[in-house]
Image: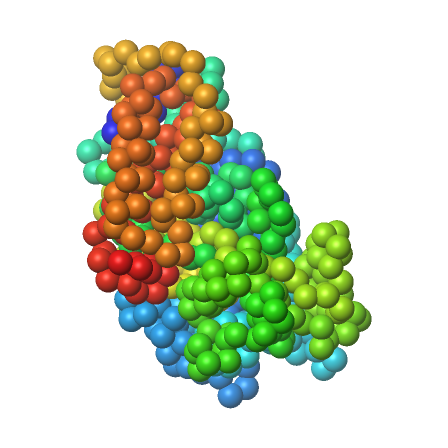
Amino acid sequence: MRRYLDISNVNYSGKKFDVLIIGAGIAGLYAALNLDAKLSCCLITKESIDISSSWLAQGGIAAAISEGDLPQYHFDDTIAAGAGLVNEEAVRILVEEGPEDIMRLKSWEVPFDLDDEGELMITREGGHRRRRIVHAHGDGTGRETIKALARLVAEKENITFLPNTFLFDLVTKGQKVKGILIGDKNKKEFIRSNNVILCTGGSGQIYLHTTNPGIATGDGLGAALRAGAKLQDMEFVQFHPTGLYIENNKGRSFLISEAVRGEGGILRNIRGEAFMENKHELKDLAPRDVVARCILAEMNNTKSKFVYLDITKKSKEYLSKRFPTIYGECLNQGYDMSKDYIPVCPVQHYMMGGIKTDLQGRTNIIGLFACGEVANTGVHGANRLASNSILECLVYSRRIAQYLNSDCRDLIDEYRIDKSKKEYEKDHFDVNKEKIILKELMTKNAGVVRNRANMEKALIKLEKMKDKLINLTISSKERAELYNMCFVAMEILKSAIKRKKSIGAHYRED
């Protein structure tokens, strides 16, 4: 692996900030808002603010705020879903501090849904034994939260926002962060900072079918890996049980939120038979890994490409109000949720593994922090509990900001990157073709069900792709994305091969 993707034409512009935040989903925005106003901050996002996994988040945010619920109960459900591989201290922080962050969002005018008495409406999702999910605009929680946070960010004089900006690399000196390289095919720019927070999301685009947006190509993971950051638990890839099935779908998979089952939805096979009754004590609200495997088993048994989700016992008025986004998309595809069963199948959804961090979001690289899906705090273990993802973004991005407020490393020395003497090939390379090959390899060999032989064959093929990539000029965003996707996919396969026993989202049929 090369240290930097492309340093042939770097502009040392002199730009510098106390803190750089890469990613403008909920983790990035919340971190910026919790920084002390005396700290200069640059918030960088790959495209526009409305393109992120956070924006697409439907279900809501889990927190023990309802009467009769306790952080301990939320703790127990999180431990159970994570199959015992969680960091218990990290989970304790999550469930105990999370309610306060929910109340802060409410005070910041995130438009959570309220009942007739003005209290937060709370629902239930898979793996939760109590109702503890708050939501906004029915199934638009992520979108509405980002819109509210973005308005506040725009009012902050200490925050500079850079949209449509691609992260090529983290710049380090020894084990210390010195800044980042951003740019395009023609020019790279070095922005100085001794404190960088990665909030770059996941890498769902390494699979053919994912709920992740097109920007989710593992850029933060790739940059961190090149800088020497430690990755952990990369084998744990979550497949959401209920992606909307569309024949020959070539784009992002549309998610049918777990909240639909939380409001009474029943999974049925193509014969109309409910099949979760005897599969788990929580039936249709079992943890995601369990439900995904049960659906695959039904698909295999009935030789079908999907199963059905039945929520027809609810009225059109209720469904269109509670799930406006899902209801509208189903109508677009020809399904009226109040009358028709919805065809669904498992699709890649979330990375539990990522950059290893401590409880303040610190990595093994001094000055490098990570939060959200790109990070591995240990709160999810082998399988993420529904709606814990945004909660993790809130709690741990705030903790990073609080740490930096009291211990922000000052910029002192100038730094320039040592130029590589290696000459790279400039041959034509069909990036799109190679991306499809990679996606097909991962979908077929590192999906819901895996075995050693297939994973090893896939790894050998990706090693050959890597050998081509490391000798190529990687000056464009498209090539950089493929480079990151390849190395992240290899990390997933190597970790999955190493873990021989099935646990959580990692299921070995051998």
> Residue 495: percent from the left, percent from the top?
25, 50
Q: Taking the image as drawn, is residue 165 in sight? A: yes
- The residue under the point 44% across, 77% down is 279
**Residue 418 versus residue 256 in the image, above or below:** above
Scheme of colours in the image: rainbow
Q: Position of residue 88 (x, y in %)?
A: 29, 70
Residue 223's quadrant in the figure? top left
Q: Nearer the viewer, residue 212 or 302?
A: 302
Q: Is residue 43 above or below residue 13?
A: below
Q: x and y percent of residue 217 in the render?
A: 44, 39
Q: Quadrant of the N terminus?
A: top left
* 331 lies left or right of 342: right
Q: Which residue is rendered at x = 80% and y = 71% of the image? A: 317
Residue at coordinates 55% horizontally, 58% vertically from top-left? 304
In the displayed structure, does residue 186 sit left or right of residue 72? right
Q: Nearer the viewer, residue 17 or 475?
A: 475
At x 37%, y 61%, the residue is: 505
On screen, residue 343 above or below 98: above
* x and y, in percent, of residue 455 in the image: 29, 46
Q: Is residue 345 above or below residue 202?
A: below
Q: In the rendered picture of this protein, how many numbered marks are placed on residues?
A: 0
Point out the residue furthest to the bottom here. 68
The quadrant the C terminus occupies is: bottom left
